[in-house]
Image (cartoon, helix red, strand yellow):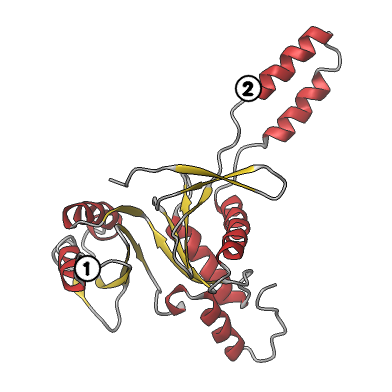
Amino acid sequence: MSPAISFSPRINKDGTPVWGKRYIDGPGVWVTCVKGKEKQAVGELYELFNGLGAELWPEPQDDDENDSDAADSDEGLSIEAQIASEVSAMKRPKKEQRFTNCQTNTPCVVFISCKPPIDPVKLVMKHVQNVHETGLTHTRYSLRFSPVSASCVTNLPEIQTVCRTVFEPFFGEAVGQKFKYKIELRIRNHTTLSRTDLIEAIAKCVPEGHTVDLDDPELFIIVEVFKSICGVSVVRDYYKLQKFNVVEIANAYTAANPKSSANRIE
């Protein structure tokens, strides 16, 4: 259901290629940032997300460690055998990047796509909860984080299909539980579908028995529409955590802990 993806190489200062996606592709994370600092935001998000990803979803032993062990074991081999071992190591598949920047061509907005096993909601929740507990954002240019569990082209049938899939673990599997929910819809650079049409179509995907509560919802349905792409996720504590704006979370921490000497970006 996601739109076709096209890849384009970018070149680092040292001449090495960096691969990015020309088009938005979920799951992933929308992040608003300081205007004119989009590239810097992408860089700090890679560092932040890779660190959180390694903590939440540890990877198998690094190939470099395996190569080092193999080199030690190759010392007693013949020249031919050592060459064969080196060739085999070169042919070994390289570790795939977990996070990729997608071009938005829009000021103040970046999108980082996530590959399995990364869960964007768990990733963002871990980060904003860390900021809530410590007052440290670990970023300088990134502001609001919006996770996307799944995305599709912005037309009502596809949006409803994605919504039903994303909603099932929250609304469908909670036997006997009834939740209060609110749809948090944000639209950027899109004029085809109206806000009312989108909200009505999304609400129809919520199973019966659950009720809308605009003041004190338990679940928040986050819907991000950007140009022709729609992303959906379900989260908790959205208001408590300042709508996932890490600067506001850090400011709230500082206000509540005036004696704290923590550096917000530390």
Q: Position of residue 215 (x, y in %)?
A: 28, 84
What amino acid type is highlighted by mark number 2?
Lys
* Residue 199 % position (x, y): 20, 69
Question: On residue 91, which mark appears?
Answer: 2
| Discs 1, 2 touching: Cβ within 8 Å | no
Other residues around mark 1 within 10 Å, as few (<14) / some (14–19) / many (≥20): some
Q: Which circle's residue, 1 or 2, is located before the other in the chain?
A: 2
Which residue lies at the image location 83% right of the left edge and 10% below the top edge?
79
> Which quadrant of the structure image shows residue 222?
bottom left
The residue shown at (70%, 18%) is 87
Q: Of circles 1 and 2, which is in front?
A: 2
Say which amino acid is labelled 1.
Answer: Lys
The residue indicated by pointer 1 is 178
Q: Secondary structure at mark 1?
A: loop
Q: Is residue 36 above or below residue 176?
A: below
Real-space CA distance between mark 1 and mark 2, rounded to the nearest whole angstrom: 53 Å
Answer left or right for 226 relative to 179. Answer: right
Q: Residue 95, position in %: x, y?
A: 59, 36
Foreground residue, 141 or 93? 141
